[in-house]
Image (cartoon, helix red, strand yellow):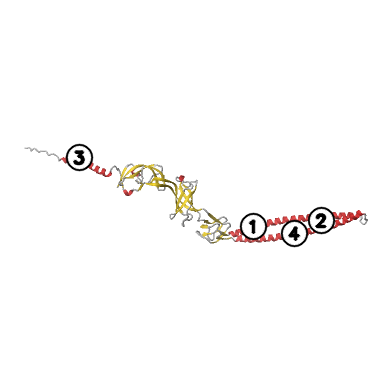
Amino acid sequence: MDVVRKSSSAPWWRKYWYVAAISLVIVSLYVVKSILGDASYIVQRNELLTATVEQGNFRVNVRATGVLKPQDIRWVSSQVSGRVEQVFIKAGTHVAKGQILMQLSNPELHRSLEQARWDLAATRAESHASYVALESQLVDLENTVLAANYSYQGAKLKLDAETQLLKQGNGTVSALDYQRSQLTVKQQHQYWQSQIEKVEKMKANLSATKTAHNARLGLLENNHSRIKDQVSALTIKATTDGVVQTVSLELGERAQVGDSVMLIADQRTLFAELQVQEVKVRDIAIDQLVIIDTRTSQISGKVIRIDPAVNGGMVQVDVALTSELPQEARPDLTVDGNIEISNIENALYLKRPAFAPRFSQTNLYKLSSDNQFAQKHLVSLGQSSVNQIQIISGLSAGDHVIISDTSSWQEHNEIMIN
C-alpha cells in the first residue's frame, strides 16, 4: 500500500538569500561612503609634501652659482730667457710691488753686458782723442788766420805809406816797388781769407765729427743700457701688491722671453662671476641687487654686466660686491648668488610645487580643514622665485596645498589621505 508523503516548504532565508546579500552590499557601500565621502582615491600621508599659502612681500629671485674673481689681476712674465736659480715666493703669499719673486741665471747675458761696457768705454776714449786732435788742428788754423791777418795789415800799411809819398811827389818810391806792394797786399788778403775759410770748414768738420761720434756713442749706450736692463730683469719682481695665485716655473726650469712666471691678484677688489640659465637671464637687468652666499657669510652686491653670449646654456653675469668682504673671501671661491628681480607687495605665494611653471594654470590639491581629504582646484600662477611661486587666483592665504608630485592621480577630483 502506497504511503502519501507530505512536501515540506523551504526556509524563508534560503528563498530570499539574495535580499541579505544586497542589503550587505548596501550597508558596505554606506560605510565606505561615510568614510571616503566623495573621495575616489586614497593616498598615504607619508608620501605627501604640503605647504601653506602665505601673504606678504614676495621677492622674485634668480639663483645662480659662480666664483669670486679679482678685478686687478696681473701675470708676471719673464722679460729675458734664463734658468730658474731660486724661487723666493710660494702660492698664497702676500707680496708688495717691487718685491723679489724669482731669480734667473743667464751667463751669456753677463758676458754681453761686459762686452758692451768695454765697447762703450773704448768708443768714448776714441771719440775724445778724435775731438782733441781736431780741436788742436782748429787752434793751429786759427793761429794761422791771425798770422795772415797781421801780414795783410803790415803789407797794407806799407802800401798806404807809399801811396802817400807818391801823392806828395816824393821820388823815393819807384813805380815798380809800388806795384809790388800792391800785389803783396792782394796776396796777403787772399791768404788771410783762405785761412778764415779753412777755420770755418774745420769747425764744420768738428761739429759733424761730434755728431757722428755722439750717434755712435748713443747706439752703444742704448745697447749697454738694454743689456743692463736684461741682466736686471733676471731678478723677477712683483709688479703690484696682492696675493700670489699660481707659480708657473719651478727650480731648474728654463724660462723664455714672455713666459708667465706668477699670477698675482689683489684680494681686496673681488667681484662675482655668476652662471645664469639662459631662460632666466631675460629677467636680469643692470643694477639689480644681489646677495652672494659664501656658505659662511653673505655679501651684498649689484649686477654690473650681463654677457651678451650664451655658453653651454649659461650666461655669465658679473656682480660688484658693495659690502665688506668676509675673511674667507678669496679668488676662485665657489659662491651662490640670489639676484633680486622684483619685490611684489601683499602677494599670495607658496612653496613651489612640482611641475608648476610660472605664468601658467595648474591643478593643485587643497587639503580639507581636518587634513583628511584633498580636493583638486584650478590655480593661476604668477612670478616664480628660487623655491616659491606667486598665486594669482584659486587659493587663499592659510590654505594647505599638496606640493609633491600628483601626476599619478590627477584624474581624481578628491582624494583621501590615510
The residue that label 2 is drawn on is 192
Q: Residue at x 69, y 57 (%)?
A: 214
Q: Residues within 10 Å of mark 2 (few under 14, many from 20)?
A: many
Q: Nearer the viewer, residue 223 or 365?
A: 365
Label whose residue precedes the other's in the sequence (3 or 4): 3
* Residue 357 shown left or right of residue 87 in the figure: left
Mark 2 or mark 3, which is nearer to you?
Answer: 2
Label whose residue precedes the other's in the sequence (1 or 4): 4
Q: Residues within 10 Å of mark 1 (few under 14, many from 20)?
A: some
**Whether residue 30 is visible:** yes
Above or below, comparing residue 220 to residue 34 in the picture? below
Q: Residues within 10 Å of mark 3 (few under 14, many from 20)?
A: few
Numbered badge on residue 19: 3
> For the residues marked 2 and 4, what is the alpha-carbon distance in whole angstroms?
20 Å
* Residue 51 shown left or right of residue 123 in the figure: left
Above or below, comparing residue 401 to residue 160 in the picture? above
Secondary element at image label 3: helix
